[in-house]
Image (cartoon, coloured by chain):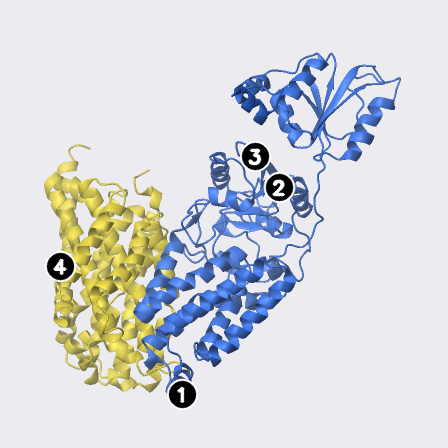
Chain colours: A blue, B yellow
């Protein structure tokens, strides 16, 4: 048994997690070799742990530098920590602090802190005779360059996206809001992962109750680790059984900055490029950063087009089914003849025809998504020809149905947010079934259900349906239509900000 | 802080809940019913009906004002004692539930006549009850939002209903008061049914954020209803000849039937389907009132249990009662009578009673 344990946990390791925990609660000892012993016991079977023993040239003290290879920046370790300590000598050195050419250092005596810091890419400097350890910020790990996020490309906006390092991401946001009211609250989530989560908000704008709600919910999370922002989203959203996303995940710094300025809260999760934003409303998922950089008339038209797309994506197939199955008297004769001709050879009822095509379309979309680009193109061609031509020629599907399905697909792609567009696409299936069973009545009842659900949803305890229900006329300046920039002098009420006026607020005494 | 303050509604929501409750099936039937009794002067009866309902509404607010944190269920217990108060509460629950039954059965009946003649009523009820359940479960907050949504989402309906005017004759309305005042007055009672809904102020008042504007709000709500009814009645009278209109039960739907677009005919099918929004906006506040009453009488907390109870009862009722024209009309008539007693007479009597009670019994204490 003991052998097995030592095999799994490593030879020199503490026998159990409890023993290690006990050590972690102790302080750093003054004896260097004792400290190094503790480290070796704590971190067994970890070949990437580097311990470098040396003598400090200034004071000729014995010292050791400990870090985890791969999480640190080799240049700063070699040039800025080891080099000055080994070679430099200054006569006028008076402080007891060793010579380290690193911006951020701190000393600690807690093993717990040292352990966490090591895993975050800090290097720990132990010096013989001192009961403390100096942690140097030498972080540096492989990361990709800034690039435009694939799911949220823009025409005129900035072409930068978030990467997997929280510090960088926060810096990107700060570039847009150089204001000291932009506060950052840091929390750790996950028993094992200890994922760093930074909450960004404008202290004089954000609603304190919403902020408290957000922090409470994050503190209540009980998980092993957070791998991606999407996991946090599901853990803190108001209603997990809803089909609609209640919080926004974006990879665009400019989008995050504009949401923070509107009084919302942003959540930067370390090791994930997605930034979570809340509280959100249903209509804000239909806005893009581009809306504010194109002419307002054009932007408004585009927004209306998106909402039209929303309706088409949900209702077009079901309306077609309802009309063909139940209410053909609604269609004028001329159009009815055309429809009839197209449907004459099809052996299935419209619902089967529609379900067949829609399911196939969804498969095609999903298949194209995960495949490498050249293969994805092939899938598109095969799918397009099979769906578009062969099925019609074979008499399995009517021409009109192909048109309906394609229009639905196009309409669903116009919705700018990926999560929302997926939800909307899913909604049309129950609608189609309802339409096949109850015609127009089924569609209207389905709509009522969706609307009722939407209106009862809340995002961080703020109503999700604003400004549609509860109605807020001021917010309609920037919902379906975007008014000219100078008209948008108030932050949207939906996030319940403390400070409503966007500019001139330093002149208002009350705000 | 009262137990209702967690579900505050804004003034706008209060207005739209009340007017949403008032505007319901009446829009479809009122022109025909009034034409039968008062000819083309029927629209005058609506104004008189409006006057009555505004007066009673103000009386209701006067009662509620004395106890701003109480619904009618709390107040009746305060003034009438435990058992009599409970009886009054129960009668309100039964009344509200009766309204729900009547409205749902009528809605199903209209759907079956106009849109889906072959679909059976239980399955229609089954799907219709889903959104109603979801919205009522959310409490008054969600009901208020839904009422707002319905109000703005159905704005196109009056515009659509105005289209037929171009083929109408204004002369149909003249002469005004052609047969004297008596037929007009006799038709007023028929308009009472269409104005029912203001009595929900008995329940809504404690939820209202800004209680000072309660009277203003209920006045606006009644006036919106008045405008809707006057609009549809006058248009039907202008479009149809005075004799023709008497033949139609659902005059409004006949009004829409001839409207054509290049890609759409038989507009009444689409109109009626969307009209379900308006009808459910009438049903939900009544259902909520019934649920709140049950909560109060039995002490059950939360809306879910009473709601499920009512839905099961609804299912049983739709299975037992045959949904025929006579049945639906009969229910509507009964509702009119009960409404007359509970919504029009009860507030006045209760107001006098509370006034006397406060004067005679409270004064020595203070």
Label 4 Cα crowd, 10 Å radius (few <14 / some 14-19 / many 20+):
some
Both labels 2 and 1 in a single chain:
yes
Q: Position of residue B202 (x, y in %)?
A: 23, 50
Return the residue at label 1. Answer: A334
Disc 2 with disc 3 on a shared chain:
yes
Mark nearest the camera among 4 and 2 is 2
Residue B174 sits above or below residue B157 on the image: below
Q: N-terminal of the two: label 1 or label 3?
A: 3
Q: How many marks?
A: 4
Which label was assigned to residue A271?
2
Of badges 3 and 4, nearer the viewer stands 3
B77 or A46, which is in the foreground?
A: A46
Q: Which mark is residue A193?
A: 3
Cβ atoms under marks 1 and 3 closer than 8 Å: no
Seen at 44% across and 76% down, the residue is A397
Q: Are marks 2 and 1 in contact (CB under 8 Å)?
A: no
Q: N-terminal of the two: label 2 or label 1?
A: 2
CA separation, marks 3 and 4? 66 Å
Per the model, the C-alpha gap separating discs 2 and 1 is 60 Å
User: What's the distance in space between the residues labelled 1 and 3, CA to CA?
Assistant: 65 Å
Q: Nearer the viewer, residue A368 or A301?
A: A368
Q: Position of residue A276 (x, y in %)?
A: 55, 46
Q: Viewer-proximal residue, B32 or A152?
A: A152
**Image point (45%, 65%), residue name:** A359
Q: Earlier in the sequence, mark 2 or mark 3?
A: 3
- The answer to whether B40 is drawn above or below residue B274 in the figure is below
Neighbourhood count class around disc 3 (C-alpha, 10 Å): few under 14, some 14–19, many 20 upward: few
Residue A340, image quadrant: bottom left
Note whether residue A441 is visible. no
- Quick check: A394 above or below B289? below
Q: Which residue is mark 4?
A: B338
């Amino acid at each position: 048994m003991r052998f097995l344990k030592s095999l799994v946990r490593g030879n020199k390791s503490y026998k159990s997690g409890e023993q290690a925990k006990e050590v972690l609660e102790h302080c750093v000892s003054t004896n260097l070799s004792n400290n190094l012993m503790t480290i070796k016991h704590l971190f067994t079977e970890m070949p990437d742990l580097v311990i470098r023993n040396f003598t400090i040239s200034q004071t000729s003290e014995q010292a050791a530098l400990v870090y985890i290879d791969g999480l640190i920046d080799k240049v700063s370790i070699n040039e800025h920590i080891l080099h000055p300590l080994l070679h430099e000598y200054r006569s006028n050195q008076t402080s007891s602090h060793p010579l380290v050419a690193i911006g951020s250092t701190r000393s600690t005596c807690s093993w717990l802190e040292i352990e966490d810091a090591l895993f975050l890419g800090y290097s720990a400097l132990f010096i013989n005779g001192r009961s403390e350890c100096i942690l140097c910020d030498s972080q540096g790990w492989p990361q990709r360059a800034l690039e435009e996020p694939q799911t949220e490309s823009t025409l005129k906006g900035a072409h930068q996206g978030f990467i997997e390092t929280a510090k960088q991401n926060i810096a990107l946001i700060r570039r847009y809001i150089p204001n000291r009211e932009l506060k950052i609250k840091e929390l750790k989530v996950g028993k094992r992962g200890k994922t760093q989560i930074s909450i960004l908000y404008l202290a004089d704008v954000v609603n304190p109750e919403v902020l408290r709600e957000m922090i409470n919910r994050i503190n209540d999370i009980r998980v092993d680790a957070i791998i991606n922002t999407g996991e946090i989203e599901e853990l803190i959203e108001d209603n997990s059984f809803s089909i609609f996303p209640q919080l926004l995940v974006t990879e665009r710094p400019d989008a995050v900055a504009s949401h923070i300025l509107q009084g919302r809260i942003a959540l930067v999760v370390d090791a994930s490029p997605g930034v979570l934003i809340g509280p959100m409303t249903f209509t804000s998922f239909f806005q893009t950063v581009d809306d504010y950089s194109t002419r307002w008339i054009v932007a408004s038209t585009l927004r209306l087009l998106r909402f039209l797309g929303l309706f088409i994506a949900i209702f077009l197939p079901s309306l077609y089914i309802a009309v063909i199955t139940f209410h053909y008297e609604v269609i004028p004769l001329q159009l009815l003849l055309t429809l009839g001709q197209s449907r004459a050879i099809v052996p299935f009822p419209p619902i089967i025809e529609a379900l067949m095509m829609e399911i196939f379309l969804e498969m095609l979309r999903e298949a194209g998504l995960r495949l490498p680009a050249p293969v994805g193109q092939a899938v598109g061609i095969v799918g397009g020809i099979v769906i578009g031509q062969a099925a019609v020629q074979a008499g399995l599907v009517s021409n009109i149905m192909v048109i309906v399905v394609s229009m639905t697909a196009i309409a669903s792609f116009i919705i700018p947010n990926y999560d929302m567009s997926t939800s909307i696409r899913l909604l049309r299936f129950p609608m189609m079934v309802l339409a096949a069973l109850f015609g127009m009545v089924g569609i209207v009842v389905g709509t009522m259900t969706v609307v009722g659900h939407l209106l009862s949803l809340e995002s961080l305890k703020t109503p999700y349906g604003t400004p549609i229900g509860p109605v807020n006329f001021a917010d309609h300046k920037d919902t379906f239509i975007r008014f000219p920039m100078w008209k948008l002098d108030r932050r949207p009420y939906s996030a319940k900000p403390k400070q409503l006026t966007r500019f001139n607020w330093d002149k208002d005494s009350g705000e | 802080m009262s137990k209702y303050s967690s579900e505050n509604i804004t003034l706008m929501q209060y207005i739209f809940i009340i007017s949403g409750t008032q505007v319901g099936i009446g829009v479809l039937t009122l022109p025909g019913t009034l034409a039968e009794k008062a000819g083309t002067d029927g629209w005058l009866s609506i104004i008189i009906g409006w006057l009555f309902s505004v007066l009673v509404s103000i009386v209701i607010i006067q009662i509620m004002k004395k106890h701003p944190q109480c619904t009618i269920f709390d107040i009746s217990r305060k003034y009438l004692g435990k058992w009599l108060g409970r009886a009054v509460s129960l009668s309100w629950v039964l009344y509200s539930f009766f309204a729900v039954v009547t409205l749902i059965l009528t809605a199903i009946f209209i759907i079956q006549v106009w849109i889906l003649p072959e679909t059976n009523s239980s399955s229609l009820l089954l799907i219709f009850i889903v959104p109603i359940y979801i919205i009522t479960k959310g409490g008054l907050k969600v009901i208020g939002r839904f009422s707002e949504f319905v109000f703005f989402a159905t704005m196109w309906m009056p515009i659509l209903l105005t289209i037929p005017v171009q083929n109408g004759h204004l002369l149909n309305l003249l002469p005004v008061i052609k047969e004297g005042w008596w037929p007009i007055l006799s038709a007023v009672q028929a308009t009472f049914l269409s104005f029912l809904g203001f009595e929900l102020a008995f329940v809504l008042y404690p939820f209202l954020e800004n209680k000072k504007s309660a009277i203003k709000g209920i006045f606006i709500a009644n006036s919106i209803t008045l405008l809707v009814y006057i609009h549809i009645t006058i248009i039907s009278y202008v479009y149809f000849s005075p004799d023709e209109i008497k033949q139609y039960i659902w005059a409004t739907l006949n009004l829409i039937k001839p409207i054509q677009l290049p890609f759409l005919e038989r507009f009444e099918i689409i109109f009626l389907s969307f009209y379900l929004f308006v009808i459910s906006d009438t049903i939900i506040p009544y259902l909520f009132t019934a649920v709140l009453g049950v909560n109060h009488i039995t002490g059950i907390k939360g809306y879910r249990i009473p709601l499920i109870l009512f839905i099961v009862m609804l299912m049983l009722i739709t299975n037992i009662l045959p949904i025929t024209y006579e049945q639906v009309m009969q229910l509507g008539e009964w509702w009119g009578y009960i409404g007359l007693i509970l919504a029009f007479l009860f507030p006045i009597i209760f107001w006098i009673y509370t006034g006397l009670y406060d004067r005679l019994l409270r004064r020595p204490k203070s």
